[in-house]
Amino acid sequence: MPTWDAQAYAAFTDERARPFVDLTARIGAASPRTVVDLGCGSGALTAGLAERWPTAHVTGVDSSPAMIEAAEPYAGPRVSFVQADLVGWRPAEPVDVLVSNAALQWVPDHRALLPALVDALAPDGWLAFQVPGNFDAPSHQALRAAAAGPAYVAHTSEVVRPAVAEPADYLAELTRLGCRVDAWETTYLHVLQGPDPVLHWLEGTGARPYLDVLPETLRPSFTEALRQRLAQAYPAQPWGTVLPFRRLFVVAQRQAG
Ligand SMILES: C[S@@+](CC[C@H](N)C(=O)[O-])C[C@H]1O[C@@H](n2cnc3c(N)ncnc32)[C@H](O)[C@@H]1O
């Protein structure tokens, strides 16, 4: 599990919010009472769920103390935050809507969690999650190539790579678990501005496990090696730097009875 820096993660708020919006738009719940956001991060998107469903109490769950601290200002009468590992998390009562955006990929073998997540739902409850599907993209190839450099490999070789399944696999598994499933994928073309934007993007997410394990003295040269690879893979254009980003979406409704 990497450490999180809420400020670095917030650098691309609009781009990172878009899949959350696209995911939750497909949840058909009309007036849920209990909504849970697993791996909620810094809380702004979680709080938006309380606005969408004025009858709901919304709970954000995240294992990172930094993220929970950043989320606290969004807490209120209908929004609360809990620091906990989503792997062992079980609700006190059945949940009407369970959301997880850009978090499950950090949980090794998260497919094994699906039965427990479906079990946590009320009859007719909804499970909606989004995970990145870009681990073979040039950005991640650049990360792995930089991390394999002779100066870094002794530190980085044990870094666990996030992994996801294909949408059709999630669909098959959740259907077997008694859900009606809507699964799809989208490749966003983010147009990023400023110098080295893909590096800054990765510093908020994908590069964190590598930066975490490197001694402080090696981080600047590692970052520079990564910067050079990314600048080649994602050349700046007059309109900005285009970062194609594939994401996988699953919205499942538990079928009562
Ligand atoms: C990329 S951020 C996404 C945050 C938020 N859902 C969003 O869409 O902006 C991933 C979040 O998942 C959390 N996370 C990762 N593994 C977790 C686990 N096992 N239990 C709880 N939270 C976890 C991290 O702490 C981080 O806040």
Image (cartoon, helix red, strand yellow):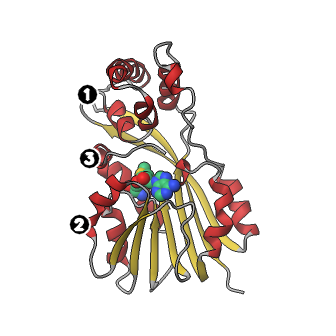
Regarding mark 1 in the picture, which secondary structure is present there?
loop
| Residue pictured at 57% horizontal, 33% vertical | 136
Q: Amino acid at mark 2?
A: Pro
Q: Amino acid at mark 3?
A: Gln
Give the class, few, some or many, for how many residues have Cα within 10 Å of label 3's Cα (few <14, many ≥20). few
Q: Residues under labels 2 and 1: Cα distance?
A: 31 Å
Disc ID at residue 195: 1
Q: Amino acid at mark 1?
A: Pro
Q: Earlier in the sequence, mark 3 or mark 2?
A: 3
Q: Earlier in the sequence, mark 2 or mark 1?
A: 2
The percent position of residue 11, horizontal first and vertical second, equals: 27, 44
- Would residue 255 appear left or right of 92 to someone viewing this image? right
The percent position of residue 1, horizontal first and vertical second, equals: 49, 45
Q: Residues under labels 3 and 1: Cα distance?
A: 18 Å
Q: Is residue 25 above or below residue 246?
A: below
Q: Is residue 130 visible?
A: yes
Disc 3: which residue: 7
